[in-house]
Image (cartoon, coloured by chain):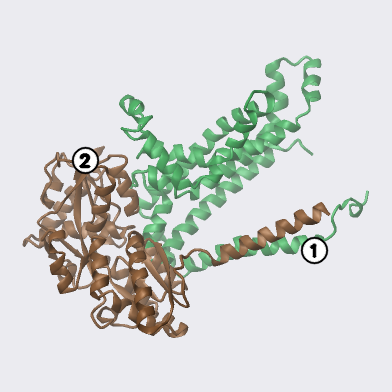
Chain colours: A brown, B green
Amino acid sequence: MARTIVLSGITIYVLAALAWVLTAGVVRDGGKVELLNVACDPTRELWRDLNGKFIDQYKNETGNDVTIRQSHGGSGSQARAVIDGLDADVVTLALWTDTDAVRKAGLIDPGWEQKPNKGSLPFTSTIVFVVRKGNPKKLHEWSDLARDDVQVITPNPKTSGNGKWSFLAMWGSVRHRGGSDAEALAFVTAVYEGVPILDTAARGATMTFSQKKKGDVHLTWENEAYLEVQESKDELEIVHPSESVLAEPHVAVVDRVVDRKGTRVVAEAYLNFLHEIEAQEIIAKHYYRPTHPLVKKQTASQFPQIKLFEAIPLLGPGWDEIQKRYFAEGGVFDQIRVGRRHK
Amino acid sequence: MSTVGRRVLPGFGLGLGYTGMYLSMLVMIPLAACLLKAADLSWSEFWAAVWTPRAVAAYKLTFISSLLAAAINVVLGLIVAWTLVRYQFPGKRIVDALVDVPFALPTAVAGLVYASLYVENGWLGQFLVPIGIEGAYSRTGIVLVLVFTGFPFVVRTVQPVLEDLDAETEEAAAVLGANRWQTFYRVIVPNLIPPTLTGFTLAFARSIGEYGSVIFISSNMPYETEIAPVLIVSRLEEFAYKEAAAIAVLLLGFSFVMLVVINLLERWSRRHDR
């Protein structure tokens, strides 16, 4: 008798565990129609706030309930998950090439950059410096990073979106001022020679800099820089160089998935909502730069006015070419001997 | 004597079927998929993907640090297993339970904790770095976390064998005039070699694929502290699935050869058993 109880207990436990495992992995926010937003890592809090607002608004306007499930991970691995069959209704990734890889797999229709009606870019960001309190090494401009006494913390551009944008910001800072590619290479090489640790992902680099106190300057997205400084208990501060790259984390509806699931209307409403004033205000609150002219004006004081250059065509005619030229196997980054100054 | 009568449980067919299915689903099919993916490349493409100076440096680092870590684990594991089996002391059961912690802890946590401890301003690093021991962001660090992740294997393979050793065998050796060293060397050690080799193999194999802990304690510098799994991830980021699979296949091939060699050694060490 006792054995039967134990055995059935174990069976129930195993079945429950199995059911839990099979249904887990995504967060639900309550409702009927279900959208899955496959996003990159650092946008967790941003989407939580945006989703809450959208669910309320959608209920008010149409009377329908909608659930939004979120999945977060590295931008590239998220793209691969969608390509391999994760049923994402929308993808909100850090890099154009990641979203376009989903298009190349036939899941998104060509021309996604122009959609939905107001463009696929509800917010932008840029790469800034986080330095130790008081900026002891006096780092103000990109050119300061190449100095012999400066150690730079930035993740590997081959494995991290954050690392890629930082690399492009460095390279672009030279080209934008009329420098040649050769000068850009010399500058970027000098900076990477001062990189003591090449973390594989953005989060690792943040810990290396803020917790383990390695390096003099950490290159990171503007919104992450604000969070890093807030969490540092007054040990860090942000420096905005006078120019930097315009980071463009695009959003897109995954056409094949929404057509199959019949969620196109909601998915497009969701992305359109991002361009509305309420959403744009939430976006600005999370330190992403809003793209709505009105909200842009309202929050201008929050974002220092620095010159933001676009990667295209400054660094290459298109993202595929940029990826290939700088980050592919045997590309520019592979020619650079990282960390040589610190042997 | 008939073997049929010795079967405690019926169902050889079911058992074998289950084993076959389990191995296919969990091991063979994924492996075959990996091989197939890499097989899309021509020979020259395959070699171009797997045999660059940077990749070779990464393989060397991965295999040498894994071997080193497994070797260290043999020494540590034997001492711990011996202590746990042969001595009585308060808190023994807690120590015994602690041995398994490296399996339970997410390895990324281990990497992060080790890195914070051994970095210049860390608890241990502040004393060790001035005397030249850099435990974080160095090859030493990589070996350190690999020792951690592989630690339980040798202990857990040697422990039961040590427990099963008859006291009578040692007494017999003593009665026959063996001194303590001879008893240890001629009676105990031969019994411990096979489980030690098994533990070594497991720890070694575990280390080759370890990613989570290493990327946090290594500085991941190409040619110096970049392990082979990082190469696979960087190729995946380019959506170069085939090239990533090619590197995986090469690593698998290497590991397979080394495992075969170790298994042969183990068999040779058991040559007197039967």
A39 on left or right of B64: left
- Amino acid under disc 2: Arg
* Coordinates of residue B29 in the picture (x, y in percent): 59, 66
Q: Quadrant of residue B175?
A: top right
Residue A136 occupies which quadrant of the picture?
top left
Q: Quadrant of the C terminus of chain B?
A: top right
Q: Which residue is mark 1?
A: B13
Cα distance in 3D space between marks 1 and 2: 64 Å
The quarter holding residue B91 reads top right
Secondary element type, mark 2: helix
Count residues near mark 2 (Cα–Cα under 10 Å), then give few for <14, some for 14-19, many for 20+.
Answer: some
* Residues marked 1 and 2, same chain: no
Q: Examine the rendered structure and indicate whether residue A46 appears above or below residue B92.
A: below
Residue sitting at 80 percent across and 53 percent down?
Answer: A3
Residue B161 visible in the picture: yes
Front residue (pair B23, A60): A60
The residue shown at (38%, 29%) is B124
Write down the chain letter for disc 2. Answer: A
